[in-house]
Amino acid sequence: MAADSPTPRTHDGRRARGDRTRREVARQAAMSATVHGLDAITIGSLAARTGHSKSGILTVFANREAIQLAAVAEARGLYRRHVLDPAGDAAPGAPRLRAWLGNWVAYLREGVFPGGCFIAATSVEYGHREGPVADAVRSLTREWLTLLEAELSLVAGARPDDDAFRIDAYLRAGNTRFQLFGDPAELTRAHRLARDVFDT
């Protein structure tokens, strides 16, 4: 082995540092996106927020678009962790929908993202665009709507497409009003109206 070849331990250390940088930058990018938008993400601002150097960030991300895509993936993971996964033991159909809606309210109240719901924020920003980041944003929204429709299809009398539309609309409106007025009652209202779509 050449004298300057990295040892396995050195290689593992670099990989661990790179993984940590990737996670921290993706998390900060996702947080920033809910306040300033995905388009406002810059390597310089992320370096300032995370304490990593610009060159260190560029070592693990090829460009700004890669960071934006990582932000969407990070947001998806957080959404699943806070809204969907805790309802895993709920029975399919109405019980699972009730659990999701309750978790969604908690996710907003707890301020998981500083600017509210990531899906709502980025859907508006990228609704009229094309490209990999726009595709990722659309995919995230479509995944949520598909999950709603699948559970609603198990509820007697439900019209899954229409009812998923209504639930999503109430939640987005509740998120917007909560961000504007800071009144948790707007989330309570959104929760009640969304539940009434299938739980009457």
Image (tube, rainbow, N blue to C red):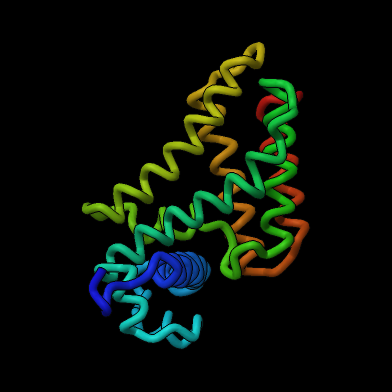
Residue plotted at (74% across, 65% down): 183
Instruction: Locate the C terminus by quadrant.
Output: top right
- The answer to whether 162 appears left or right of 37 in the picture is right
Residue 4, position in %: x, y?
26, 79
Q: Residue at x 50, y 81 (%)?
A: 50
Residue drawn at x 48%, y 30% is 146
Res. 34 visible in picture = no
Q: Return the x and y of residue 119 as percentages of the image width and height.
A: 49, 52
188 on left or right of 133: right
Q: Is residue 164 visible?
A: yes
Residue 186 picture quarter: bottom right
- Above or below, 175 relative to 99: below
Q: Which residue occupies the foreground of this view, 52 or 68?
A: 52
Question: Closer to the camera, 133 or 24?
Answer: 24
The image position of residue 54, as x and y in percent, is: 34, 84
Horizontal side of 113 relative to 44 (left or right) equals right
Q: Nearer the viewer, residue 133 or 123?
A: 133
- How far across and down, in percent of the image, does residue 114 sit? 60, 70
Q: Quadrant of the N terminus?
A: bottom left
- Quadrant hosting residue 90: top right
Whether residue 197 sits left or right of residue 49 in the image: it is: right
Count the marks: how many? 0
Q: Quadrant of residue 14?
A: bottom left
Residue at 35% across, 66% down: 67
Residue closer to the observer: 89 or 198 = 89
- Look at the picture and state if 39 lies above or below 100: below
**Residue 116, relative to residue 96: is it above or below?**
below
